[in-house]
Image (tube, grey):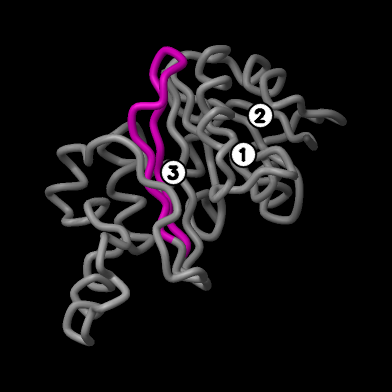
Amino acid sequence: MGIGYKTSWLAVQDATPEDVCDALGLRQQQYMDWTSGTHAAYRSGVFVIRPVPAWTIAHGRIHLPPEIDLTDPRFPAWLESMSTRLGDLQFFTSDRIGEDHAWARAEGGVLTRAYYYSGTLGDVPLHYGEPTAVERQLGVGQRWLEDGWEDWEDAEWEAWHGAMPSERHVMDIARRWSLCPLDIVDEKVTSRGIHGFP
């Protein structure tokens, strides 16, 4: 089982797992191999590892501060503070059950792009910055509940839903921005990572 579906992850460029753990404030840290850490983070906590050169991944369902979710105005500030500490980073989440999908990028402590579609809410509660080239190519990340949505007819709602992202789009954006965790070959990951709890 690889990292990717039904979870969230940070991809941090040129940072050590120890640095990322410190920035996330992880406690009860334990070193684990790729398989054990991945399974553990799907149950609870966060697993931080550098599975490929140049990128460290912090994966888990709870690595955001517990009182903050993607609809919270403090979420962009959290990403910026993480980027100030760690440098360039990206955030992704994908959950096909509720059709909740998001991606964000912060560079040098500045949030440059963020988009969150919540199928659970039927809304796009976060859209910041201009769509990137890959988003435009995929046809996602360009719509939210624009002015006048209260008067939309069925055809307009169908077009809106058709422009919303799926988990496949999240993986494609991750692949083009940095790396897609689904592309990591489990058997080739020889480094150990760190599992801990915020």
Quarter of the image with the N terminus is bottom right
Crowding around mark 2 (Cα neighbors within 10 Å: few <14, some 14 to 19, many 20+) is: many
Q: CA distance from mark 1 to mark 2?
A: 7 Å
Establish if 90 lies above or below 115: above
Q: Nearer the viewer, residue 100 or 143?
A: 143
SS under mark 2: strand
Q: Amino acid at mark 3?
A: Pro
Q: Is residue 158 left or right of residue 49?
A: left
- Label 1, secondary structure: give it: helix
Let me know if residue 110 is in the magenta part: yes
Could you say which disc has been placed on residue 181 in the image? 3
Q: Look at the picture and state if 195 lies above or below 152.
A: above
Q: Secondary structure at mark 3?
A: helix
User: Quick one: which residue is furthest to the bottom in this view?
Assistant: 154
**At x 38% / y 61%, what residue is drawn?**
167
The earlier-in-sequence mark between 1 and 2 is 1
Q: Which residue is mark 2?
A: 193
Mark 1 = which residue?
34
C-beta proximity under 8 Å, tags 1 and 2: yes
Residue sitting at x 34%, y 27%:
112
Identity, as a three-letter code, of the amino acid under mark 1? Trp
Direction from residue 189 to residue 184 in the image, left or right: left
Residue 185 position by quadrant:
top left
Q: Which image quarter is the C terminus in?
A: top right
Residue located 84% across and 29% down the image: 27
Q: Position of residue 47 (x, y in %)?
A: 67, 37
**Gap between marks 3 and 1 measured at Cα:** 12 Å
Point out residue 102 in the picture as x, y percentages from the top left corner: 43, 50
